[in-house]
Image (tube, grey):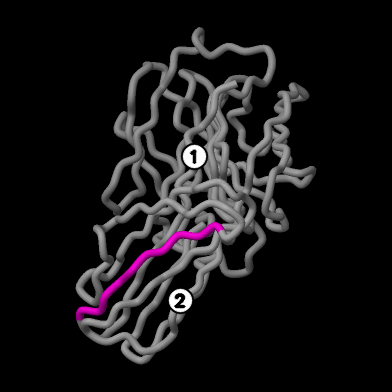
Amino acid sequence: MLFLLVLRGFGLLAAFLALFFSTTAQNPPTPSAGRILLLPRTIVSGDRATLAVLDVNGRLTPGAAVSFSNGDRLTTDRTGRALFVAPLTPGVIFGSIAGHEGRVPVTVLPPGETAASAVQVEAIPKIASITDRFEITGRGFCGDADANQITISGDPALVLASSPTSLVVLPPADLQPGRASVDISCAKRNGPPREVVFVLLTLQADSSPLAPGVLRRLTVHVRGTTSKVTLEAKNLAPDIAELLGGNPLRASSSGGAENSAQFEVVGRKRGSFLVSIRLLSATPRAH
């Protein structure tokens, strides 16, 4: 989950940066709004795969141009995703959104090393956010994202990016915090269910005015688990305020019934102050 905090000279506005993935939205982002490229961690030589492009608000972005370091180019369709065929030569290639800096690596695997007659899950997070994407690795998935059927507690999830060996999945909108069964199938091939703990993050913050030298404490409450989780805060306006302890800054929650984590900022000057806070998924477990 990602929080967007806006601190102004006359107060604090705390709001969720909502993740909105709708292929039927009346006002989808313009192609130039694409900022985040989602690629499967690995793709299979000569096989199909799906990528996605998001804007800064997490919305799928139609018409976004994507280029690869091997010279391949493509454009996302009306769903904000694009189906493509992996290069024939194994190795690492890089993808990027046209007109923007930053490259995303993806490893092209030889087909003989990834063949599978059934869906096999090799790694899945122990803990994931209700409102953020998570990754599943294994074998026997479908490269066409919509050919995969992923359900969480019986409700369909959205596959954003996929390959035969990697999936990037967004949980259902109505999912409740706590343990949930994740079921995966592709082309009538079913994999064994996996259990993931999904958590909900909520923010508590002082709304009094921020001024130079004033200290503010941001408390993030964790619902859905009593285990400790790791959160990362990133100061997006360091000239306005300082995130104490570093930027970005990671903190572990307390665990227990009142599971929470705290971050502190101190004002440098009046103006808009932005901090993002997100859950760092626990290390995926192998099965």
Label 2: few (<14), some (14–19) or many (≥20) C-alpha neighbours in 10 Å? some
Q: Is residue 111 left or right of residue 107?
A: right
Q: Position of residue 30 (x, y in %)?
A: 47, 63
Name the main secondary structure of what is drawn in magenta: strand
The region drawn magenta spans 259-268
Q: Secondary structure at mark 1?
A: loop
Quarter of the image with the C terminus in it: top right
- State how far apart marks 1 and 2 are (Cα): 26 Å
Q: Residue furthest top?
A: 112
Q: Residue at x 51, y 7 (%)?
A: 112
The amino acid beneath tag 2 is Ala
Q: Is residue 267 magenta?
A: yes
Q: Position of residue 169 (x, y in %)?
A: 59, 42
Label 1: few (<14), some (14–19) or many (≥20) C-alpha neighbours in 10 Å? some
Q: Is residue 116 magenta?
A: no
In this view, the residue in front, 175 or 104, is 175
Q: Position of residue 132 (x, y in %)?
A: 55, 52
Q: Position of residue 118 (x, y in %)?
A: 69, 16
Q: Residue furthest bottom?
A: 10
What number is the disc on residue 97?
none
* Residue, disc 2: 205
In this view, the residue in front, 19 or 101, is 19
Q: Is residue 83 left or right of residue 65?
A: right
In this view, the residue in front, 135 or 145, is 135
Q: Residue at x 35, y 52 (%)?
A: 250
Q: How many marks?
A: 2
What number is the disc on residue 282?
1
Find residue 168 and report its image quarter: top right
The amino acid beneath tag 1 is Ala
Do the numbered discs 1 and 2 sit on residues whose CB atoms are within 8 Å?
Answer: no
